[in-house]
Image: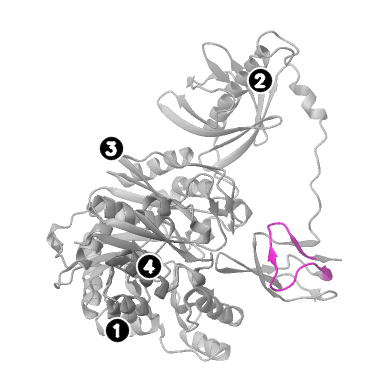
Amino acid sequence: MFKKILIANRGEIACRVIRSAQKMGIATVAVYSDADARSPHVEMADEAVNLGPPPAAESYLLADTIIQACKNTGAEAVHPGYGFLSERESFAKACAENDIVFIGPPPGAIAAMGDKIESKKLAKKAGVSVVPGHVGEIDDTEHAVKISTEIGYPVMMKASAGGGGKGMRLAWNEQDVREGFEATKREGKASFGDDRVFIEKFIEQPRHIEIQVLGDKHGSIVYLGERECSIQRRHQKVVEEAPSPFVDEEMRKAMGEQAVALARAVDYHSAGTVELIVGADKSFYFLEMNTRLQVEHPVTEFITDIDLVEQMIRVAAGEKLPFAQDDITLTGWAVENRVYAEDPYRGFLPSIGRLVRYNPPEESHEEEGCTRVDDGVAEGGEVSMYYDPMIAKLITWAPTREGAIDRQIAELDRFELEGLGHNLDFLSALMQHPRFRSGEITTNFIAEEYPDGFQGAPVDEKLRKRLAAVAGFAAAAHGDRARRISGQLNGPLQPPAEWVVEIDGVTHDVHIDLDDVSVDGEAMELAMAYAPGDRMVEAEFGGDTLAVKIKPGRYGFSLTTRGARHEVRTLPKYFAHLAAHMIEKEPPDLSKMLICPMPGLVTALHVGEGDQVEEGQPLAVIEAMKMENILRAEKAGVVSSVSAAEGDSLQADDVILEFE
């Protein structure tokens, strides 16, 4: 077994690999860019080597520098994690040439599966079902239009070397192809150094299901069940679960055997994933094979009780797999949510900044359920524009699917994250959505269920009354503190017992006394402890526990729970009627301005001063976190002034241009 390995990655996956290596008694070496000098993975490792400036092209993608770091530290092997160099055939070869073991598949398998055009040809030859499409190279936009028309719309344009949702465009018509083909090429070039694109038929109402395979260097290859990854946004996975609620044993066996056949065709060893697009009739087609560890691997680990990172290390060291296909059993259900630095209340735009508060739920492993958090950040750290926006992964396991989902909801309520936009509320809303809970999902789920964006999970009367009780209790606590401070309370010697609480435009009468709390005359059976300054409260209503994030405001509190943030106004009843005379502040009129929605780089500016624009016309392109975002005109107008130029780095809410 290896004595020391180097992890050629950053963030949560670097931490994940380090944990397994430490469990095995293996020393670890971390690498880092200047931006990651104080990151948790650097502190966790036994040694750390600086690679260079923040941009990945000047640090984490420098294969020669990483190999030299192995030599300098005595690392015998490299685990690449995912992304960066994990699927670079040239890096795996360079490791071998320098007598460094690559903890992953052989270079030939990476080459065969990394090229999405060639991999489809190989899959077809191996007897694997493939999606109809064009698997040759495409010359230019006109050629792309011709091919798309022949296949039949809708079609999907994909960067040949792409992955992780980058370099993908869905085209419903010729105009979409003309607008998106060059952008797909640019994203492929920027993210993967390869601008080749292929086009295939888009399967409508599809599910995205993948098979985890694991093989050793002695010819043994097994599949470890499937993962459902259909909940996606912009082709980026958001929620994953194992097993899939759609797959039966017969289908699982058929998909697994095809995945193993494909792996054998390229002499595969180590962990890998065969991704499939699945139709409503349970037909399935090969999409691609990821020759690396997947972001969503923890859900497979939970239901199989197999540490995939440990097995990758053992396989790389030449050990045989300690189990055969018949030994694999799937137990319980696991769900993973990806916590992203993005603001769902602003169209899911990327968000960067400092983690002013970061306090994830505590990990637990019990018979009735388990909670696991995979992250690579810490309170006070920064989410920068240079890397992927994922902050953490929240994974829960329970004996049943419903139990795993309910556990997610409870743990998301307890997940404290402040300082930048994040998707915790959105994830909770997904977990509560009746369609998700029924298992009737497709890759179109988010687009279909949130066509107008996300404004928080719906709240019913029962939850609203419970929040009113919490707000009233907290208001009374603040009143009691004010009573104890000389001169700070003009009025009764005791804090008010009667409160008027307004939530989402609905007003409730809340009564507080030593024995109980009532809302609109209904006893709430509330038990909770709160002192001014607390950021989180656990409110018990009979046998139910509700975790609520609480932040005082000018006239009340901001309460966040169950996938929504509520601005709550609390006023003592004896003067609440005066609130009707308060003047509401009018927000500024920004309708004549194009505002930068996120921090990013202006890569294209399509209009100039005096230009006439039409509704829907592209105005500018902002690149953030390796993704291009096209900003379009919301209505027709004439550009009166332009404040930005191509190449400018803008902050959120900077003005790009103004209309007359």
| Closest to the observer, 71 or 419 | 71
Q: Could you tell me if residue 486 is visible in this image? A: yes
Around disc 4, counting alpha carbons within 10 Å, would you say few (fewer than 14), some (14 to 19), or many (20 or more)?
many
Instruction: Identify the amino acid type marked 2.
Output: Trp
What's the CA distance linking mark 4 and mark 3?
45 Å
Q: Nearer the viewer, mark 4 or mark 3?
A: 4
Whether pointer 1 and pointer 2 mark residues with C-beta atoms closer than 8 Å, the reply is: no
246 above or below 68? above
Q: Position of residue 456 (x, y in %)?
A: 57, 46
Examine the image and state in which quarter residue 270 appears. bottom left
What's the CA distance linking mark 4 and mark 2?
64 Å
| Residue beneath disc 1 | 122
| Residue depicted at x 31% and y 79% | 93
Residues shaded magenta: 638-657
Q: Position of residue 609 (x, y in %)?
A: 83, 74
What's the CA distance linking mark 1 and mark 4?
36 Å
Instruction: Identify the amino acid type marked 3.
Output: Glu
| Closest to the observer, 542 or 334 | 334
Q: Earlier in the sequence, mark 4 or mark 2?
A: 4
Q: Position of residue 556 (x, y in %)?
A: 67, 29
Q: Could you say whether the residue bearing mark 2 is in a helix, strand or loop?
A: strand
What's the CA distance linking mark 3 and mark 1?
44 Å
Instruction: Identify the amino acid type marked 1.
Output: Leu
Q: Position of residue 128 (x, y in %)?
A: 27, 78
| Residue beneath disc 3 | 368
Residue 646 within the magenta-colored segment of the rendering:
yes
Q: Earlier in the sequence, mark 4 or mark 3?
A: 4
172 above or below 280? below
| Residue beneath disc 2 | 499
Left or right of 273? Residue 179 is: right
Whether pointer 4 and pointer 2 mark residues with C-beta atoms closer than 8 Å, the reply is: no
